Amino acid sequence: MAASGKSFLADAGYGEQELDANSALMELDKGLRSGKLGEQCEAVVRFPRLFQKYPFPILINSAFLKLADVFRVGNNFLRLCVLKVTQQSEKHLEKILNVDEFVKRVFSVIHSNDPVARAITLRMLGSMASIIPERKNAHHSIRQSLDSHDNVEVEAAIFAAANFSAQSKDFAVGICNKISEMIQGLATPVDLKLKLIPILQHMHHDASLASSSRQLLQQLVTSYPSTKMVIVTLHTFTLLAASSLVDIPKQIQLLLQYLKNDPRKAVKRLAIQDLRLLANKTPHTWSRENIQALCESALNTPYDSLKMGMLSVLSTLSGTIAIKQYFSSAPGAAATTARSFDLVKLAQECCYHNNRGIAAHGVRILTNISASCQEKDLLPLEQDAVFGLEALLVLCSQDDSPGAQATLKITLTCMVKLVKCRPHLSQSVVESLLAQLHSAQDNARILMCHCLAAIAMQLPVLADGMLGDLMDLYKLIGQSATDKKQELLVSLATVIFVSSQKALSTEIKTVIKQQLENASNGWTAYRIARQASRMGNHDMARELYQSLLTQVASEHFYFWLNSLKEFSQAEQCLAGLQEESSSSALSCIAEALKSYHKGIASLTAASTPLNPLSFQCGFVKLRIDLLQAFSQLICTCNSLKTSPPPAIATTIAMTSGNDLQRCGRISNQALTLSLQMKHSMEEFRNLATRYGDLYQSSFDADSATLRNVELQQQSCLLISHAIEALILDPESASFQEYSSNGTAHVESEYERRMMSVFNHVLEEVESLNRKYAPVSYLASNTCLCNAVIALLKVPLSFQRYFFQKLQSTSIKLALSPSPRNPAEPIAVQNNQQLALKVEGVVQHGSKPGLFRKIQSVCLNVSSVLQSKSGQDYKIPLDNMTNEMEQRVEPHNDYFSTQFLLNFVILGTHNITVESSVIDSNGIVWKTGPKTTIFVKSLEDPYSQQVRLQQQQQQGPAPAQQQQQRTAYSRF
């Protein structure tokens, strides 16, 4: 867990000497020029690391040209090293700028008399096929080498032919007949035919080419019935169908036919493997007859290994649209009961099989059927699924082997899915989990705790019943300090926090702290404290953070833990809020703000240049501003309580003709208070906008963290709406846009409680608006204060992204032209346009695309005139500013585009390039970065010369005109 969930402070590396790109390249170039073979090889194999560190074209182009030189003049071992580097750095190949020169140096080796050198060159060309797909000299060399008498060269030619066929339609069309002749030729050895056949999987560029390749494969399957030939041909057949799409139903039928009729187990295994591939890729193409045929084969086979393979295909299909097609009655056919379907019979038969894998697939099929099919005759299958899951749970929880643990994971996943779709089954599922928890192995206990936590999050009604059993188990864990025991302590504590939704009792706190003192290390205590912060148990979290402060070696870690302790202390202050007591609310908020200010100071001290903790600082600053806004609103409401009763205020307002005056005993007071309320409303709307900006900048956050930010934003909008509806503008306030949020599916107890408060406040505001018109100010004040207190009484949840960054995505931008000195401007003549090239690289962490993926990058370029030089001219507004936006799709994490910018006005301009990303759902995320360069617009020499000449010619005339004008103006 420590490795998978990286702390925000874990990356901070100090004192590491970094070389810039040019120095690093020169260092490697020195190794390439060495006379020792070992040093040359060492320099070559270090290039992929260089590409990873400096992934921009200017360096990659230079580096690959140096490698091409080594390939041209080196020995075969060096060429092999260069080949491996090229294959490892395949995604950087398109950044080579001088492709012709690179290919020319590599290609010169193809004319060598050494067949091994030619073979390495062919493999090199094949690895470069993505950037030279239509090079005819490469095509010709591959064709020639296929006829070579050297086996090494022929195999290299086959590798290159496969890569070029995948990239080039022309090459695929031209080589198809050649491959066909070689495969069907009697002189070609069988092992060579087996290597040639897979090339046909790339013949999918058009329908006629795919059709001819399919016919050839059909002939091969019947002409060469040997096991190896059938396996290779069938697999190529499947890959070709999966790429061309049109022949997938035929391919499914062919594979089912071999699965049923061919007696060889190897062929059957291959058919099952390919059927699984097609089930994952195109489940919608599976007809009812296909699934029925697969069920019959599974029912009839005597071999467990084959039965498990077929069940894995069926379990994959059972979670897709194919299952609905299977259970939908055929037109004109009589409806049949669920238990009469072969799929159901098979699943029920396998649920209690002595092979764990078969049983797991059986219960998974029953679970998916119960979850996706709502028909009445399928309802009895729910109990079958529950009984099967309980039996597997008992079996696997006692076994510590990897196979049993994998089966247990499938079982527990099915339990969570079944409980989510069928809540009435949850009681029996939870009881069976708690019953097995005491006797299970430690590995199984950890997984079962995760399952219980997931169920309790979905159905909090069940949570209270778990606490007794969980606390008993927590006491019995023992004094062992093994890794599994530590993991179990964290998992059990998490379930306990989820189960005790409101607050932890003193007894529970004592038991947890006692166990931590006896059997845990500091990391375990920190993880439990982190879980307590996520679940809103801030009292427990504060004590644990306090105990850890003296156990860390780095001051950055100390400040991080101290900030967490202060935040927990602040939230604990808010837990003491009392309803309908605005004075105590103000004192609680003041105490919380005091702790929050201490915490933000520690958090700032914990940040480093490598880990700026920007999300954490942004989230906490917004929380501080929100608490201050709440405090200000309560103060304003208390001021309004000094106003006269509504009837008197209304009379004063009517006599003076100002409706706003009814909120105070004199007009100045009324106006001031109404302005304060308006200011509060605008402040809450501003906070909502800032929460929205924080949301948009958190591209790498998990969904629970984003939902948490969204809830904070909604609470700000709710209060601003309540102020508007009750005080400022009751007539035009609308409730429709706010009332729909309550129906959304909630994922956590924090969200559930916040949504409950939202709905309650909206009902109160709406009922006040309907009952009283105009609304009494006393009632308005009470309603607003109660709304603030109700929101603050829900313990804040610090979600995962506050502590862990599971996904890491960043963008590096490079602008050209760029000045040597960042403060130095680029000189441009005002009658020319600047071609600004923007290149960028998307950099990922260890788990790219875990939560969301980048679909495209949006680049926004704007320029601002900083200082003007020269005379003012009347210039069209279009020429005064530059505002441009382009969207580019990264390819292999690299993108490039250009902007043409006008600088007609003489002076210094500030150009800002800002990037944001668009994910696969079309949502824009403001991830940055923002880069700035300066441009100095100069007058072109010809215009300057013409202007100077005009000034010299017209110099005396204005002076004379001025004198005449002065003389005449006297009369």
Image: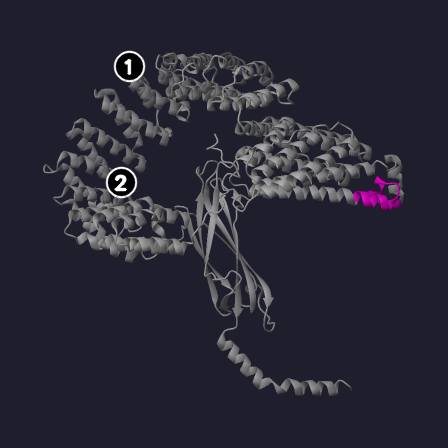
| In the displayed structure image, the side of residue 327 where residue 228 appears, left or right | left
Does residue 25 appear to the left or right of 828 in the view shown?
A: left
Q: Is residue 425 above or below residue 642?
A: above
Which quadrant would the C terminus be assigned to in this image?
A: bottom right
Q: Which residues are magenta?
A: 656-674
For the point 62% across and 21% down, the residue is 509
Q: Nearer the viewer, residue 1 or 369?
A: 1
Q: Which residue is mark 1?
A: 300
Q: Is residue 666 magenta?
A: yes
| Mark 1 element type | helix
Kindly identify which numbered label has been placed on residue 500. none
- Residue where numbered disc 2 is placed: 202
Give the percent coordinates (x, y) of residue 761.
70, 30
Q: Is residue 266 visible?
A: yes
Instruction: Using the rendered view, name the quadrant where residue 786 is placed.
Output: top right
| Spatial CA span between label 2 and label 1 | 36 Å
Q: Is 743 drawn above or below residue 99 in the view shown? A: above
